[in-house]
Amino acid sequence: MRILISGICGFVGSTLARALLEHSPGLELLGLDNFSRPGSEQNRAPLKQMGVRLFHGDLRNASDLETLPAVDWVLDAAANPSVLAGVEGNSSPRQLLEHNLLGTVNLLEFCRRHRAGLVLLSTSRVYSIPPLAALPVEVVDHAFRPAPGAPLPPGLSQAGISEAFSTQAPVSLYGSTKLASEALALEYGESFGLPVFINRCGVLAGAGQFGRPDQGIFSYWIHSWISGRPLRYLGFGGKGHQVRDLLTRATSPRCCCGRAPATGAAAILAEIAAHAAAHPGWLDLSAAH
Ligand SMILES: NC(=O)c1ccc[n+]([C@@H]2O[C@H](COP(=O)([O-])OP(=O)(O)OC[C@H]3O[C@@H](n4cnc5c(N)ncnc54)[C@H](O)[C@@H]3O)[C@@H](O)[C@H]2O)c1
């Protein structure tokens, strides 16, 4: 079987590549990256050593995909993954749309041409912000928990948020590029008989991230902590009671992402330190810069 991973030199792409080759050594793995993420370059040589065929290309340019060999499956891990993309100074809205939406369109055309299946890495950021921000909560052990007895919106239960939760705007500009990509991917699947899988990942974190704020709170915090920078809590009273799940490959290598228990931000570093102590190598910061 031949698989193409777009964004293969990013955090998720390189993690997926390593996991796939560990579990299926005979796999023929191709990778495409434009090396726009600072740090991606560091994954180039190790991936080549593992036998990955790397192509330097940009998903925004349809012609960059024209010379790629046919594949059976595409795993799309190329994107600007920052929730602030397009609205802060580092990228324009048009750049975000071109990377995250036009890139999906070009990849879907590639899949249609080669009759390849697609696994699209989407995001939990497709869920509507106002009902999330208005959730009735109480503080238990320094963490927000759903307030007992309070009515919950459709799609939310004590088990978390399901696909039935609202995706009504506003979801962020980043989230809207992913939601639109999801719709197009499903339509291509339906119209052209292609298998399409969508994973609305929450926060993914672990070795190989670079501690930039746009890579999510966990990586940012760990690197801030190590560099002795202050840890700040933003929003919701500034006390750090917000809760996020953390997905990491090491807790469940078979599916590439495991699930660590949701916890309040104020308690997260202690949990991370304990997890790192119990899983040597999980918190490998050697790639940090
Ligand atoms: N990291 C998370 O917490 C998280 C959470 C939910 C969803 N996701 C999704 O997972 C995917 C991967 O995220 P990540 O954290 O690995 O990001 P990343 O920035 O580490 O990796 C993205 C890779 O894609 C490449 N890339 C970007 N635009 C490209 C383009 N136009 N053409 C070719 N290559 C391009 C970058 O150079 C980089 O190597 C994204 O789609 C992201 O939205 C990530």
Image (cartoon, rainbow, N blue to C red):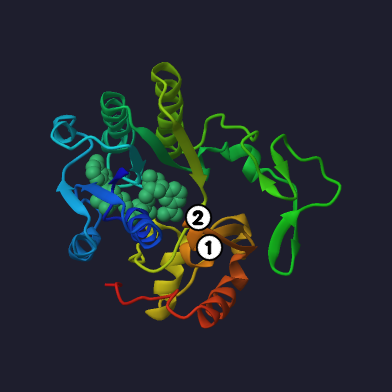
Q: Alpha-carbon distance for marks 2 and 1?
A: 6 Å
**Residue at x 56% of width, y 56% of height:** 235
Q: Quadrant of the N terminus?
A: top left
Q: Label 1 amino acid?
A: Ser
Which quarter of the rendered picture does the C terminus lie within? bottom left
Percent across and percent down for residue 130 are 61, 38
**Which residue is farthest right?**
149
* Occupied quadrant, residue 261: bottom right
Q: Which residue is mark 2?
A: 255
Q: Which residue is mark 1?
A: 252
Mark 2 sits near ligand 1, with its Cβ under 8 Å away: no
Between 266 and 77, the residue placed more toward the observer is: 77
Instruction: Work out whether residue 69 or residue 139 is closer to the camera in this orientation and state it.
Output: 69
Counting from the top left corner in percent of width and height, residue 119 is at 41, 39
Comparing 190 with 216, the one in front is 190
Disc 2 and disc 1 in contact, CB within 8 angstroms: yes
Q: Is residue 67 above or below residue 247?
A: above
Determine whether the residue tagged by mark 2 lies in a helix, strand or loop.
helix
Q: Residue at the spot x=34%, y=66% of the render?
A: 208
Nearest the camera: 80 or 213?
A: 80
Q: Position of residue 40 (x, y in %)?
A: 24, 59
Q: Give the residue drawn at x 27%, y 49%.
A: 28
Residue farthest to the front, as pictured: 26
**Which residue is depicted at the point 16% across and 47% down?**
55
